[in-house]
Amino acid sequence: MQNHSSSYSRGVFRSLFDFKFSSLIAPRVLRFLYALLTILTTIGAVLIFVELVNQGGGRGLAVAVIVIPLYFFLYVIFWRIFVEFMIVFFRMGEDIRAMREQGGGLGAPPAVSLPAPPGSYRQPTAAPQQPVAPPAANLPPPPRPAAQIPPQSQFPPPPPPRGY
């Protein structure tokens, strides 16, 4: 795994005033954002749990015990995936920058080359040449003429509009 410390080497305050955008603060802010979202989700789940238990009744207690933990874990998983996606996005940018700085591009050309288009290569001379039929023999028969459409005057006139 590569070291992604190039954008983390500066402090957050110094990076804020880096107008060349040579160091990124988003990964550090995203870590803080994930911690904040996890704390807020936990507080929200606890408050809803306490409220449902205080309301009393079997239904409120059942919802508090079953639904609230499920809600909590689904939201934490959602926030985690969202923040991971954003961090991966920024790390891809760092990797591309490192490749550019090293003078690399997309790498070496593929080992397998594509075949030449038809007609751009010679057939082997050892094999006997097969006679080729003239192109006209391989064509389908010409289409039949379309039925003639009568002129507009041969159609009956449309009925008059009905009054409503």
Image (cartoon, rainbow, N blue to C red):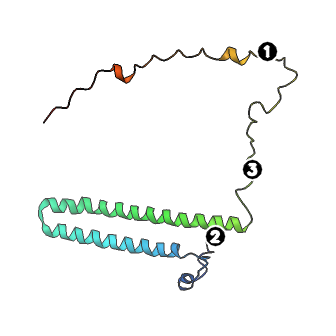
Q: Is residue 22 above or below residue 82?
A: below
Q: Image check: 26 left or right of 43? A: right
Q: Secondary structure at mark 3?
A: loop
Amino acid type, label 3 = Pro
The foreground one among 52 and 7 is 7
> How far, Cα to Cα, is label 1 from label 2?
65 Å
Q: Nearer the viewer, mark 2 or mark 3?
A: 3
- Mark closest to the chain's N terminus, 1 or 2: 2
**Mark 3 closeness class: few <14, some 14–19, many ≥20 residues within 10 Å:** few
- Write the residue at 71% across / 18% down: 135
Crowd rating for badge 1 (residues with CA inside 10 Å; few <14, some 14–19, many 20+): few
**Place of residue 117 in the rendered image (x, y in percent of width and height, measured from the top left):** 74, 34
Residue at the (70%, 66%) spot, across then down = 100
Which residue sits furthest front? 153
Query: Residue 109's mark?
Result: 3
Residue 31 position (above or below residue 78)? below
**How far from the left and from the top, in percent, is residue 131?**
79, 15
Q: Residues within 10 Å of mark 2 (few under 14, many from 20)?
A: few
Q: Is 149 displayed left or right of 141 in the figure?
A: left
Q: Which residue is mark 2?
A: 3
**Measured along the vertical axis of the image, is residue 126 above or below residue 86?**
above
Residue at the spot of label 1 = 131
Q: Which label sits in the foreground, 1 or 2?
A: 1
Q: Indicate which label's residue lies in the foreground, 1 or 3.
A: 1
Report if residue 114 is visible in the image: yes
Residue at point 81%, 32% (across, down): 121
Disc 2 residue type? Answer: Asn
Q: Residue furthest right?
A: 126
